[in-house]
Amino acid sequence: MSNGQTNTPAVEPLFQPFDLNDLTLSNRIAMSPMTRQFSPHGVPGADVAAYYARRARGGAGLIVTEGSAVPHDVAHYTNRIPHVYGEAAMAGWREVVRQVHDAGAKIFVQLWHTGLGRYTKETDNPDVPSVGPTTWFPDHPTPSRAMDERDIADVIAAFGAAAANAKAAGFDGVNVHGAHGYLLDAFLWDKTNTRDDAWGGTVAARTRFAVEVVREVKRRAGKDFPVMLRISQWKALDYTARIAETPQELEVIVTALADAGVDIFDCSTRRFWLPEFEGSDLNLAGWTKKLSGRPTMTVGSVGLEGPLEGRRVDFHKAMPVAVENLARLMEMFGRGDFDLVAVGRGILANPDWANLVRAGRFSELRGYDPEASRTRLEPAA
Ligand SMILES: Cc1cc2nc3c(=O)[nH]c(=O)nc-3n(C[C@H](O)[C@H](O)[C@H](O)COP(=O)(O)O)c2cc1C
């Protein structure tokens, strides 16, 4: 596909508006959620507002914030991860929202409980054990315990409370983090969920925790408040992991979640072009859209040569730009496989990624340099 003038992909279709419930996004490009750890004591400050506003001015129709802690003692692994609770944090978020809206974009906050993916070092409560569906987790970093009914109810309530706080702060929706091995995903994955009670045992039972979280989020924030749910097969500690071996298993998961109230699925893959199951070239977003009937967002190496590797920015690899894969992206988008396209590292490195792509200024895109992002909120110019 080409725009006829240059040998570059025709990306205009990405710059059409998209409606989700009562919300209209100005285009199909979203900034993917990215943990930055620049919010001391959980409070996003003026630098965080400027960081998101810059990317909103850079043309992304939707900003999805970094993973942010729900109000639960052991939700997060450092006290530099923003909270979605407490006066100071919510005042910080209101300013983030105001600046992003002024720049013409919409913004969802990502609601996150790390489960057993929590490191005790530097957390607010290092002596309190982390919680998960069971105590098994690859490369387990902390003392931990399996959740009882009370813990489960508390965490479900915490997601609901965070969603209500997000709505009150002016966010346009939430992205519930149900991916990458963190708490909701640990329930979905049979390796980390070997429970034999009502929260484990079958694909449907493993999905129940995420279903109840989504229901509570909808109950607290209202049925029209947009809920995006991030799911993935891969885990930060195991790229080959799968929560669904077959389309049938994926159908059980995503139809239950759609019924619970998910408005749009954020289907996290590391390379968007890879087929999810044999016999079809649909990726995870394509399959999820087909099986759930809900819109989806794709992600994974859009405009970059290779995938994200390493669970923390310290371990990420530098990655060159690869404009060529946008042609494949546009083919898949054009046939309706997904509705939104999330860009992570590309937008971190290029706050104006969407504007540059829209204008066909591909040669100005910079590759991803993890070093630039490790110690600074803004990569050096
Ligand atoms: C620095 C960094 C931090 C990330 N933090 C999160 C996070 O908090 N929540 C999340 O769901 N994904 C997180 N991710 C994954 C991204 O949202 C995205 O799915 C991934 O980078 C693939 O997209 P890309 O190839 O465009 O970078 C992070 C990625 C990076 C590079």
Image: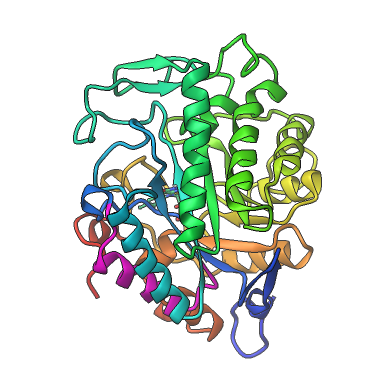
At horizontal 55% and vertical 82% (from top left) the residue drawn is 358
Residue 132, position in %: x, y?
A: 45, 22
Residue at 53%, 33% in the rendered image: 156
- In-front residue for pair 368/203: 203
- Residue 266 x/y as whole percent: 60, 51
| Residue range (magenta) | 43-62
Q: Which of the two residues, 168 or 225, is positioned nearer the viewer here?
A: 168
**Residue 61 is a magenta residue:** yes
Q: In this view of the protein, can residue 58 be seen by the observer?
A: no
Rendered view: 72 above or below 67: above
Q: In the image, is residue 70 above or below residue 97?
A: above
Towards the viewer: 146 or 367: 146
| Residue pictured at 77% horizontal, 39% vertical | 255
Looking at the picture, how far across and down is residue 6, in whole percent? 59, 86
Relative side of 26 to 117, left or right: right
Q: Quadrant of the N terminus?
A: bottom right
Q: Is residue 104 visible?
A: yes
What coloring was used for the rendering?
rainbow
Q: Nearer the viewer, residue 300 or 113?
A: 113
Would you say residue 273 sits in the magenta stretch?
Answer: no
- The C terminus is located in which quarter? bottom left
Chief SS of the magenta region: helix
Vertical comparison of 304 with 102: above or below: above
Residue with the most extreme bottom position: 5
Q: Is 352 situated above or below 298?
A: below
Question: Which quadrant holds residue 260?
Answer: top right
Hey, which quadrant is residue 200 in on the image?
top right
Residue 284 lies, in percent from the top left, at: 67, 45
**Residue visible at 55% across and 73% down?**
61
